[in-house]
Amino acid sequence: MLWTTIRLLIWLIPIGANVWADAKGRKPNYLAMFFLRGAAFITYGALWPLPTYGWILRWLPIGLYQLTSYWILFELSLNIIYNIREKEKRSLLYFDQKEGDSGWIDRFFKKHPNLHTGAKIASLVIMVISIILVYRLYEDN
């Protein structure tokens, strides 16, 4: 269980690195960030033991954990940093609604802002379920 917890917490490193890079105030190179996130995603997946059966079912909870935790924690962390630095406060669920150049997810929610909070809640539920499944699948490793 300890190793599973450590492996789950390691995923916070790429999220923190991305937050640190974006918090500098410059517009990131989104193509480069996409490739770096993909490399982190694949490298992180390699930290887990090879599945003895059904690799899709074995790695699906890890992939869901990566995707949901990244989306939740990246946005939340960036908004917390912004609120500490700036006088004008923004919601912890704020996303780019002004420029519309922060990626396809923000562009979608710019068109459908009423779906954003529900999607975050659904993402949180999926993240918790994926963590539970990871512990059940990897508790012996």
Image: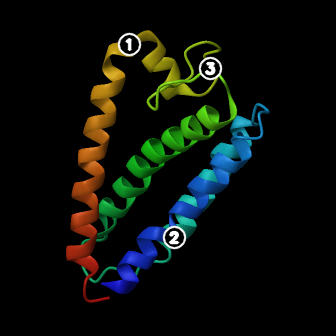
How packed is label 1: few (under 14 Cα within 10 Å), some, or many (20 or more)?
few
Q: Which mark is residue 88?
A: 3
- Return the disc, 1 or 2, that comes first in the chain's sequence: 2
- The residue indicated by pointer 1 is 112
Q: Which mark is residue 10?
A: 2
User: Eyeballing the image, is 108 above or below 93?
Assistant: above
Mark 3 → mark 2, Cα distance in angstroms: 33 Å
The quadrant the N terminus occupies is bottom left
User: Eyeballing the image, is 74 above or below 5?
Assistant: above
> As shown in the figure, which amino acid type bears the numbered disc 2?
Ile
Outermost residue toward the front in this view: 87
Say if residue 21 shows up in the picture: yes
On screen, residue 62 versus residue 132, left or right, reads right
Residue at 41% over, 51% down? 69
The quadrant the C terminus occupies is bottom left
- Return the disc, 3 or 2, that comes first in the chain's sequence: 2
Query: Residue 133, percent across and down?
Result: 22, 66
- Return the disc, 1 or 3, that comes first in the chain's sequence: 3
Q: Disc 2 on helix, strand or loop? A: helix
How packed is label 2: few (under 14 Cα within 10 Å), some, or many (20 or more)?
few
Say if residue 50 shows up in the picture: no
Query: Residue 10, percent across and down?
Result: 51, 70
